[in-house]
Amino acid sequence: MLKGTVTEFIMPKENKKFNLIKFCMKETDKNMFRTEKIMIVLITGASHTGKTVLAKKLLEKYKYPYLSIDHLKMGLIRSGYTKLTVKDDDKLTEYLWPIVREMIKTAIENRQNLIVEGCYIPFNWGNDFEKEYLDNIRYYCLVISKKYIENDFDNIKKYANAVESRIDDEWCTMESALDENTKFLIGAKKHNVNIVFIDDSYKVDIDL
């Protein structure tokens, strides 16, 4: 319980007296106002790198809810709120990221943990947050190595439906996987962000 002493407070003009409670908190009382750090986990990378699988693992391990940016994208496209299509990757990032960014800020302000996964997170994402927000965010960019794609592409295709059913996956070829992962690797290195390099095993796990 908070303990206080009563002091006299006089308004200079109206000359009215008020009772002002001056709280003298004990060290144990201060614990009431301490809050644990909130964890926002950002998972990005090229298609078929295992973003959704990792998000599901973290949900099961830490009980954090997760947001799929793909779901947000399809909701906006199918509802007609945007004329962009699934092929407009760069434009979709520009369109979706401001929405996702403010959702992240809201989650932190509300003291809620959240996992956000999707390829529409810009490499310079950190520029959009002040330090008090950044302290609560962890970022992981999944990149599959050239060697793994060339040697185990069948496994990559096999695990494509591990969490979600892909209606049309024919567009994903070895060439497209090599190209996308190279782009993400170059972008991540250029902006000096955290990379999870998948070289020996397609199954990724992280400790928060």
Image: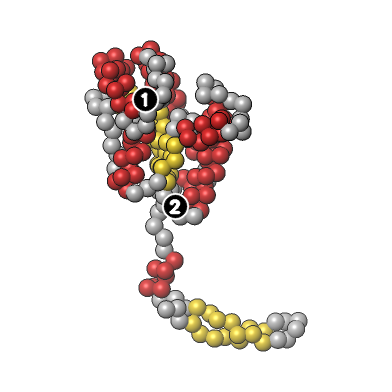
The residue at the point 52 percent across, 47 percent down is: 105
Percent position of residue 45, x then y: 40, 28
Q: Is 101 positioned to the left or the right of 186 in the image?
A: right
Image position, residue 103 (x, y; %): 52, 44
Residue 110 in sight from this viewpoint: yes
Q: Is residue 11 above or below residue 72?
A: below
Outermost residue, left side: 200
Q: Position of residue 73 (x, y in %)?
A: 52, 32
Display coloring = secondary structure
Image position of 65 (left or right of 204): right
Report the front residue among 17 and 107.
Answer: 107
At a point 45% along the width and 81% down the height, the residue shown is 3
Q: Residue at x 37, y 29 (%)?
A: 165
- Which residue does the numbered mark 1 point to in the structure image? 48
The front one of 158 and 149 is 158
The label shown at residue 89 is none
Element on which disc 2 rests: loop
Instruction: Identify the secondary structure beneath mark 1.
Output: loop
Q: Does residue 29 sit above or below 77 in this rendering?
A: below
The residue under label 2 is 112
Q: What amino acid is at disc 1?
A: His
Judge by depth and name the residue closer to the eye, 188 or 68. Answer: 68
Amino acid type, label 2: Gln
